[in-house]
Image (spheres, rainbow, N blue to C red):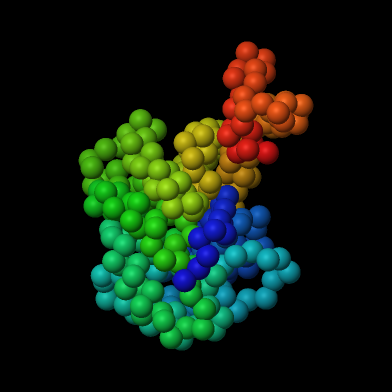
Amino acid sequence: MMDRETVCFFRSILFVPATRPDRYIKALMSEADVACVDLEDAVAPGEKEAAREKVVDFFKAETSNSIQRALRINHLASEQGLRDMLLILKMEPLPDIVMIPKVESSEEIAWFNEVMTSLEHPVRLIPLVETTKGLENAIKIAMAPNVVAIGFGSADYSSEVRGDMSWDSLLYARGRIAQAAGHANIAAIDGPWLDLGDDRGLLEDTQKITALGFTGKIALHPGQLRGIHRGVSPSEESLRQAQKIVDAYRANREGSWWSMAGWWIYLWLSGRSG
């Protein structure tokens, strides 16, 4: 089991289809925190087996950077998901992270971990919550062993609840995901911005989910990485405000609270900021 005291933060996870080995190096040399080769949605049912043969090269490829490499497998309750788990047991080297789609219970995570017990080291996991049942169990999923982040599959979720992909429609579910991540002391990863040509919309959406408590976002194209990284980074005003709080704390070490520019600052808050 992994140490939950060590929090992993991922600003960006760049997806690349398993059927496109010509894009592997570009993804691995990108500015993403994690490059993820996708065996699920990006691969047609008839191409799954051929894709499995290709993904091994993704993890063996030599690059000059230290990007983390992830594998998104198919749903564990499907035949394809079972075949993906068998693939992982034979892989060398192993993925740094395995992303598991459509997770609805912590029991699924426990089962995956049990299957992987023969491996020398535990596999870090990012379960994706994409259904109403999964959302209802989000805290238990986030607390499961070896889970380092919890992701939100916004497209599948909105389809199930018969909603759209607008901010208001997804706000409740995103709040539940952020709550689960905070409770488990892990990262929260938002689903992708689907309009590849709308850089402004990507930036604004990323800034909003960051304010909600998310730490990162899935990218479908390397061109989205700059907007995501900018969106999850604190603004200059936020950094200035944080520095003022730190300075005020250092000047008032004797008190547990004080006033700064009309705001009451408590010792607990200064501890979070410093």
Residue at 27 percent of width and 38 percent of height = 163
Quadrant of the rendered image containing residue 79: bottom left
Identify the residue at the far top of this view: 262
Above-or-below relation of 242 to 73: above
Q: How many marks?
A: 0
Q: Position of residue 259 (x, y in %)?
A: 65, 17
> Which of the image's four quarters has the C terminus?
top right
Residue at 30 percent of width and 49 percent of height = 135
Q: 168 or 148, which lies in front? A: 148
Q: 3 or 103, which lies in front? A: 3
Let me know if residue 2 appears in the view. Answer: yes
Q: 182 or 93, which lies in front? A: 182
Above-or-below relation of 113 to 7: below
Q: Position of residue 251 (x, y in %)?
A: 76, 26
Let me know if residue 23 appears in the view. Answer: no
Above-or-below relation of 263 to 247: above
Q: Position of residue 221 (x, y in %)?
A: 54, 52
Q: Position of residue 72 (x, y in %)?
A: 43, 66
Residue at 69 percent of width and 71 percent of height = 63
Residue at 72 percent of width and 30 percent of height = 253
User: Could you tell whether 134 is left or right of 236 in the image?
Assistant: left
